[in-house]
Amino acid sequence: MFRGAALRLVPMVLGALLAAPSDINAAETIVTKAPKAFLYEPSSGSILFAKAPHDPFAPGSLVKVMTAATVFRALKDGEMQTDQLCKVSEHAWRTGGAPSRGSTMFAAIKSEIAVEDLLKGLLVHNGNDAAIILAECLDGSEEAFAERMTKLAQAIGMKNSRFGNPTGYDTVPSQTTVRDQALLAEYILENHASFYPLFALPEFTWNKIFQRNKNPLIGEIRNLDGLGGGIDKNDGYSGLGSVNRNGRRIIAVVAGLTSDKHRLQTLKEVIAGAWDFFSIRTVFKAGEQVAEARVYGGVEGSVPLVSKTDIDVLLARGDTLEYRIRVVYKGPLRAPVKQGDRVGEIRVLGKHGVVYRAPLVTGADIGQGEMFGRALDGLQELLFGWIG
């Protein structure tokens, strides 16, 4: 959004704005044996921890979270209805149903099942048959649905993810990253909140068969209410969890683990780190001047940039000097300038790149200057470019 030749960067050192607590001499940090891990706080956009965030892995049945998101999107766009009936094909029954001897909701061949029930079968029973039935119902085939999944993933920003089918079967490989899985969870939470409770349904009965939620993380981590786990014969165990604790939600992802127990242990460690090693710090109050933007042709040569809300950032305790603040805007702004216009953003940069960003708006009205002043501004821009 803020790109171009007139882009201006205003760097600041966070340590100059926030004094580190005197009783902490060294930064505390999360330690995990997980080969790949990612910890994210969606409300502030803060990356709390990242380990091999872009390294690909095969997600196994964790793919079903993407399958669910794709169906949620189709429902939102009106391509499907929750009460729409989907026919159980022989392919879905043989490949994902009882004959497959895998995770299934035991859908009966040639029967018709409502989309709402199929979603429960998908997310509670981890049903491969449910995944295939939904794919065929929406797009006619697993292949066409997989293309839809990948297209949606790219739109979300999951740049390193590709999906081969809706089940996670390795007959057609899929790949993703821990960062991409965090983006997927954030997308579902922000855009399909009404469907999110399906991930934590404790049980579901279908075809007279009662099954408890097969998500290996549900009930094992306090306040965890989604999303799923997977296993691949080569890339090991992976897990995507979201926790809402004390009014604060975080998203955690781990991958490359050697066992179900190892996955659970490392995910617990990473999640606990959000509370053990980070605290919320107010960098700027709402309405407080963050920086100034240059103004071209105005009665004033600059305008204050402010945030409409407090800029609260989750920072590692005792690690403020490891962070930098950058204010970005496309300028100079041309007069007249109206107060409250969004013109830039503040970014907090840490070891893993941008860990937080928030919009900035103009803090005052700036009218047009006199003709002579505007002519001088124009001459300066023509001869020298805009000098900050």
Image (tube, rainbow, N blue to C red):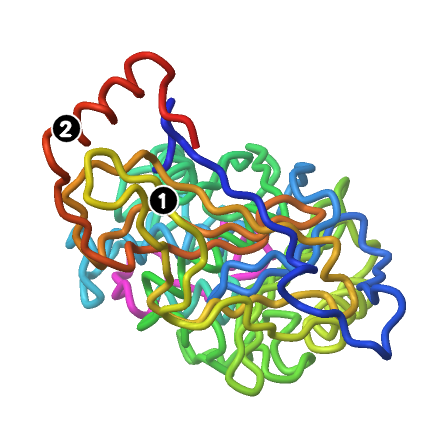
How many residues crowd around disc 2 within 10 Å: few (fewer than 14), some, or many (20 or more)? Answer: few
Amino acid bearing label 2: Phe
Boundaries of the magenta span? 96-117
Residue 369 forms part of the magenta stretch: no
Secondary structure beneath dot 2 equals helix
Picture quarter with the C terminus:
top left
Q: Report how many numbered discs are placed on residues in the image.
A: 2
Secondary structure beneath dot 1 equals strand
**Snapshot quadrant of residue 260:** bottom right
Considering only vertical position in the picture, is 23 above or below 140?
below
On residue 82, the disc is none
Q: Which residue is mark 2?
A: 372
For this orientation, the residue located farthest to the front is 372
What is the spatial separation of the Cα atoms under label 1 and label 2, in whole angstroms? 21 Å
Residue at 25% x, 56% y: name it.
Answer: 86
Image side of residue 286 versus residue 158, left or right = left
Q: Position of residue 99 (x, y in %)?
A: 54, 54
**Snapshot quadrant of residue 190:** bottom left
Amino acid bearing label 1: Ala
- Give the number of the mark in front: 1 or 2: 2
Residue at 85% x, 61% y: name it.
Answer: 31
Q: Which residue is mark 1?
A: 293
Q: Position of residue 361 (x, y in %)?
A: 30, 55
For this orientation, the residue located farthest to the bottom is 246
How many residues crowd around disc 1 within 10 Å: few (fewer than 14), some, or many (20 or more)? Answer: many
For this orientation, the residue located farthest to the left is 371
Image side of residue 254 versus residue 201, left or right = right
Residue at 69% x, 37% y: name it.
Answer: 55
